[in-house]
Amino acid sequence: MTSNTLKQIYQKAKETLSGQVSNRPEPDSSTAPSQHPRTVSPPTATDVLRYRFQHGVNLGSVFVLERWLSPQMFAEGSTGNSELDAVSRSIHLHGLGHTRAKWEAHWSSALSARDIEYLANEAHCTAVRIPIGNFTLGSAFTDRSSFSDVADVYENAWSIVSALCARLYARGIGNLIDFHGLPGGANGQEHGGTSSRRAALWENEVYRELAKRCMLFVASKVKSGELEGCIGIQLCNEAEWGAKGMYEWYADVMKAVQEVDPSIPLYVSDAWDLDCALDSTSKINTPESHSNPLIVTRPSYFVFTAADQTKTQSALIARITTSELSALDGSNARNVTDHGAYQLCVGEYSCALPSSAFPTSIDDTAETAFRREFGLTQCARWREKASGAFFWTWRAQSSEWDFEKMVKAGCVSPPDGFLVEREGVEKRVERARRREEGLRRATVEAHKLFWDKNVPEGKWDHWRFEPGFTQGYADALAFYAFRLSGAFGARIGGDRI
């Protein structure tokens, strides 16, 4: 850092402070407070649930069907691969009563008691991303949409979602409610609920208003406590590139949700333009906005594009480690006061590799080793760059898309801190407490020396730095030690903000 740069920083700081606090010299020991009270409350259980690093899985093809994952739900003669294709054909062949019973059985059996224990104790998941559609909320949210004629099938869908979330929360696992399906479609893909091949949400005001009502419904259930363990609401999944009016709709929804509960994090699709999404959300995530936190989400796959189909495994790994999510480079040093904050969550990833990734002749053992290196490289990158990541999906016939199979094969792993035994967490917490005073003193002194040496003309209120360090240290320690209280039913591990 050059002297000129330091002086520019000093001048900027001086200009900022002049409009907020009076310029005064640093107080001596007789006037500076000996203790600085916290201005932010200690983290609550909800804070930890929402703002820890999220290691999770998608519950794909449960409340929004995809034929390749749930072929048994598509009756003979179903012509498409979407939820609407499946439910319409079933009603046509077997009637409403049979179809509703079959669908409810599918939803209710998505996660058994054994499955939830596995997610909590073996996979060490902190949250499950649950794709739903507007139709999942019932007939009141299907008016004038493609699902209006089949809405009665979903009469009990939301109550089943809510009950599932309560079961997950009882084991310390949060839920991200992801609107995969919206009126008209946020994209033209069949995983959005229909085979229309259109993203009509963005061109139809009626659809957008209905979609906003969906968000308000879920927000009200979070606020009332009926929906337990919610870490956030994802407004839409994989919006089409260049979706017209998308950010205006985000702002409209955010304003409405803010009136219900301004604390609920809202996850938004980047519409395949990450730089634009980060820039746009940073203008909203500011100290002055008092708005719901906005978190950008996007899928990260390495198997679908023509370019991916030609790459070797080593080339794909090099791409992950050097350029994937590179838009987040430098975010930890970002001046959020001046420029706003941004964060990204990887909504979907898998261990699927293109055929080009493997040697011409390879046995099962070597293939698993290739896939393991690929999967663990992704996990490491997500921990380095993102606020969390959700594997796609919980159950799949192809092992590279099946979470449990990939965990058991060692291809997907949680953060190392999640695996520390209780005694190890206690020792680390005690060591952190012992070291806090020395670390604080050394850090504060280094801060003073740096600025006094490099910008000697500055009249610094150095004493303001110490309470910031103290609060940050306390928050980090509170997150890490939270499971020791028995909260969330956790047995081992510590969390990271």
Image (cartoon, rainbow, N blue to C red):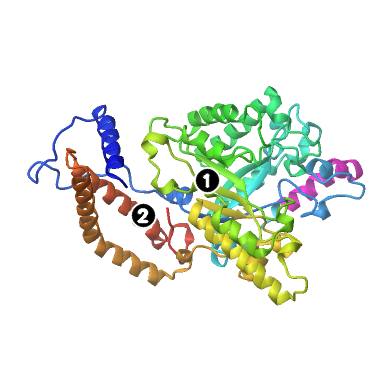
Residue 193 vertical placement versus 145 (above, below): below
Residue 77: x and y in percent read 92, 47
Residue nearer the viewer, 68 or 340: 340
Q: Is residue 229 visible?
A: no
Q: Which mark is residue 422?
A: none
Could you say whether the residue bearing mark 1 is in a helix, strand or loop? helix
Residue corresponding to mark 2 = 476
**Amino acid type, label 1:** Ala
Q: Which mark is residue 327?
A: 1
Residue nearer the viewer, 462 or 142: 462
- Binning the other alpha carbons within 10 Å of mark 1 as few (below 14), some (14 to 19) or many (20 upward) gives few
Residue 248: x and y in percent read 58, 26
Residue displayed at 56% across by 36% down: 276
Residue nearer the viewer, 473 or 351: 351
Report the magenta residues as a range.
88-107
Residue displayed at 70% across by 55% down: 308
Labels 1 and 2: the sequence-earlier one: 1
| Res. 10 image quadrant | top left
| C-alpha gap between disc 1 and disc 2 | 25 Å
